[in-house]
Image (cartoon, rainbow, N blue to C red):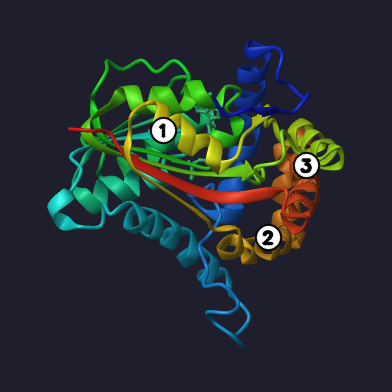
């Protein structure tokens, strides 16, 4: 069984953690939407070696990259094949429903998004209404670790940048597998800690120290590696388990985040949101340090439930 690397931050008290995450997104969602639109995730870019000497990126490029992230994840999992069109999709940790709406439009599928923040759920419902998708898409406040759905419901189970917040990674993954229908695809895109080498039992103390600081600042209570997720998938008898490290592909997003936070519009929307949001924004430098030191990785893990 894979070993979790726990941050000390909020890990002990689950109810306090859930409340903290809900309040943090309740407070910050307006600012994130103003700064980054309806997607609360990084963009996918060509790596510097694939696009040498490329022109500086514009705000539009960053937005395109956020949409591209969705397409790249679907393609990686082999869902872009029209023959395999999912009909019922679950978006776990759905934010304000940017991905949920995108997937509903792409596949004409029935979609449900869950997350912990009532403010985000309300905003997601408004966006669905505005896009004329209210009959296709619904949102509810629910815990990914204890989902309110019977087994075997969804033929695509999707989670983009919400896994980081889960205090029990194995339970999180097994809930995604439980609600997946036979033959369903599971797509998880998430920050992990680096894979351990065969002779390591845990990360180095300096790496753990940095992770703990990040955990406290960003409400990320536990960490595991992409290899850990792959072994959860294996022990759940899931098939076609694939994973990749996309850290290089998301790297340009850091400068976009810092740039939009540093504009007057960015500063004003952060100030309007409140202290928790400002604290999280200031702590982005810790995440960047984690990436630069290669302790944190941006990973995709996909698999399929047997038919
Ligand atoms: N996937 C979205 C939002 C990412 S932000 C997007 O790409 O735009 C992280 C989301 O995870 C937030 O909506 C937060 O409420 C949700 N989240 C965190 N912990 C959760 C939990 N235990 N159960 C359900 N959602 C959770």
Quarter of the image for the N terminus: give it.
top right
146 vs 1, nearest the viewer: 1
- Residue at disc 2, CB closer than 8 Å to ligand 1: no
**Number of the front mark, 3 or 1:** 1
The picture places residue 202, in percent across and down from the top left corner, at: 73, 34
Disc 2 marks which residue?
A: 254
Q: Name which quarter of the figure residue 9 lies in.
A: top right
Quarter of the image for the C terminus: give it.
top left
The residue at the point 56 percent across, 64 percent down is 249
Please report whichever mark, 2 or 1, sits nearer to the chain's N-terminal start: 1
Which SS class for mark 3?
helix
Q: Which label belongs to residue 147?
A: none
**Number of the front mark, 2 or 3:** 2
Disc 1 marks which residue?
A: 233
Q: Which label belongs to residue 278?
A: 3
Q: Name which quarter of the figure residue 146 lies in.
A: top left
Query: Between marks 2 and 1, how big is the CA–CA gap?
Result: 30 Å
Whether pointer 2 and pointer 1 mark residues with C-beta atoms closer than 8 Å, the reply is: no
Name above or below for residue 116 compared with residue 258: above
Whether pointer 3 and pointer 1 mark residues with C-beta atoms closer than 8 Å, the reply is: no
The residue at the point 49 percent across, 50 percent down is 39
């Amino acid at each position: 069984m894979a070993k979790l690397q726990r941050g000390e931050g909020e890990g002990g008290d689950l109810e306090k953690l859930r409340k903290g995450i809900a309040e943090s997104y309740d407070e910050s969602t307006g600012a994130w939407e103003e700064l980054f639109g309806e997607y609360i995730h990084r963009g996918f870019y060509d790596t510097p070696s694939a696009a040498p000497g490329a022109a500086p990126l514009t705000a539009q490029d960053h937005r395109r990259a956020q949409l591209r992230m969705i397409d790249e994840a679907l393609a990686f999992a082999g869902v872009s094949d029209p023959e395999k069109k999912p009909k019922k999709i679950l978006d776990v940790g759905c934010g304000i429903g940017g991905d949920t709406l995108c997937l509903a439009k792409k596949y004409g599928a029935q979609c449900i998004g869950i997350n912990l923040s009532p403010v985000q759920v309300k905003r997601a419902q408004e966006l669905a209404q505005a896009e004329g998708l209210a009959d296709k898409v619904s949102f509810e406040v629910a815990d990914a670790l204890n989902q309110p759905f019977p087994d075997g419901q969804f033929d695509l189970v999707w989670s983009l940048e919400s896994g980081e917040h889960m205090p029990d990674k194995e339970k999180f993954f097994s809930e995604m597998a439980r609600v997946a229908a036979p033959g369903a695809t599971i797509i998880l895109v998430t920050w992990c800690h680096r894979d351990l080498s065969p002779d390591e039992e845990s990360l180095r103390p300096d790496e753990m120290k940095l992770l703990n600081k990040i955990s406290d600042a960003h409400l990320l209570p536990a960490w595991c590696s992409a290899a850990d997720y792959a072994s959860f998938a294996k022990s759940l008898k899931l098939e076609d388990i694939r994973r990749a490290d996309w850290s290089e592909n998301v790297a340009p997003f850091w400068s976009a985040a810092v740039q939009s936070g540093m504009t007057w519009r960015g500063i004003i929307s952060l100030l309007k949101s409140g202290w928790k949001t400002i604290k999280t924004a200031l702590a982005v430098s810790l995440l960047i340090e984690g990436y630069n030191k290669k302790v944190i990785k941006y990973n995709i893990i996909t698999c399929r439930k047997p038919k």
